[in-house]
Amino acid sequence: MEAQCSLSRFCPNLSIPLVLSPKHPILLKFPSYSSRPSFVRTNHSTSNSVWFKENIACRKNCQVVASSSLEGDVSRIVIRKKKLAVFVSGGGSNFRSIHEASVEGSIHGEIGVVVTNKSGCGGAEYARSKNIPVILFPKTKDEPHGLSASDLVATLRSFEIDFILLAGYLKLIPLELIQAYSKSIINIHPSLLPSFGGKGYYGMKVHKAVIASGARFSGPTIHLVDEHFDTGKILAQRVVPVLANDAAEDLAARVLKEEHHLYVEVVAALCDDRIVWREDGVPLIQSKDNPDEFY
Ligand SMILES: Nc1nc2c(c(=O)[nH]1)N[C@@H](CN(C=O)c1ccc(C(=O)N[C@@H](CCC(=O)O)C(=O)O)cc1)CN2
Ligand SMILES: NCC(=O)N[C@@H]1O[C@H](COP(=O)([O-])[O-])[C@@H](O)[C@H]1O
């Protein structure tokens, strides 16, 4: 029996031992906050029912494969983890934070591939050290082995990538990729957008502009990616103070520390299907602890 179903919100991304048989009900364990009982009892006919498919929020993002045998052998539900592509151009500290959280289990997703325009950058080196495939994009005179946009889309599809995370990537993402991964590409920027964003605003340039402006606060922004630099809908922000004697490096370090926390929190929500869209198109995060709370 195979039911295409998304349990990613309700079941941890674990293999859950189940005793199945054509006569015995399927027991699916849900976490405590679920409005459903701690166990949903269903039988094979139910699990193929419309109710099961609709009420267990079956979506494309994971596959439930429950096999059973007449002897009632222990079978398993295998939840497919979300697949992530991370785009980098520099040291890759945000990428490392996300990878570590994925390995440790606080992010229910796995990094399938790293994309970079700088084959020798720190992020690419870290990926190689973890046996994560590295793809060069775009094709330029410096990187003649880089992929074209259409080849990159095909390659990401072949890796079954669900979400694209920009983490210090410095090239403009083309419309072809944005359209292929609609509402599924996010970026982290080191200022409180919409201030200090757009073409020319990257790395230390951002922090120098913040300090020169006299702004008393700064902080990271995570936003959806559209066809322009830094104009996509804002998903999350954190605030840090700008101190009177801050050099750009001091502010950069303070913001970067918050970036690492924020990006892990947001990617965890993304992989748990806890991003919801307000009527005006603004994305909100559903609280992990209280499903009735959004921020
Ligand atoms: N379509 C989009 N692509 C990218 C976005 C985006 O929001 N939409 N975000 C950037 C990341 N970014 C800010 O967060 C950013 C990166 C780079 C630049 C920039 O001015 N780059 C220079 C070239 C820098 C270089 O190659 O060394 C430029 O284009 O002249 C601005 C903002 C990632 N892509
Ligand atoms: N406008 C884009 C931009 O400036 N991105 C910034 O580049 C740094 C990458 O650091 P990392 O490579 O260590 O993650 C981060 O501070 C990120 O916000």
Image (tube, rainbow, N blue to C red):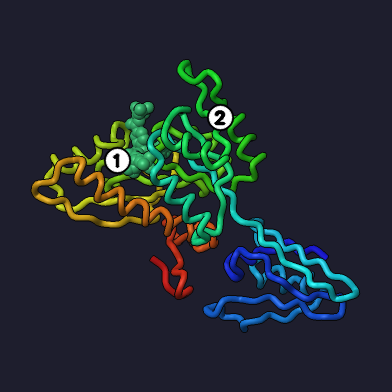
| Percent position of residue 29, x then y | 65, 76
Q: Among all residues in the image, which is located at the extreme bottom? A: 37
Q: Quadrant of the C terminus?
A: bottom left
Q: Mark 2 is on which residue type?
A: Ala
Residue carrying label 1: 197
Q: Does residue 182 appear anywhere in the picture?
A: no
Q: Mark 1 is on which residue type?
A: Gly
Name the residue rendered at 69%, 64% in the picture.
Answer: 5
Judged from the image, the secondary structure of the residue bearing numbered disc 1 is loop
Pick whichever, 277 or 292, lies toward us.
292
Q: Does residue 95 appear anywhere in the picture?
A: yes
Q: Is residue 238 above or below residue 31?
A: above
Q: Among all residues in the image, which is located at the extreme left? A: 244
| Percent position of residue 257, x then y | 30, 52
* Callout 1: CB less than 8 Å from ligand 1: yes
| Percent position of residue 56, x then y | 66, 71
Classify 10 Å Cα crowding around label 1: few (below 14), some (14-19), many (20 and above): some
Name the residue rendered at 27%, 51% in the picture.
Answer: 219
Q: Quadrant of ligand 2?
A: top left
Residue carrying label 2: 149
Q: Quadrant of residue 76?
A: bottom right
Pick whichever, 182 or 86, lies toward us.
86
Q: Quadrant of residue 200?
A: top left
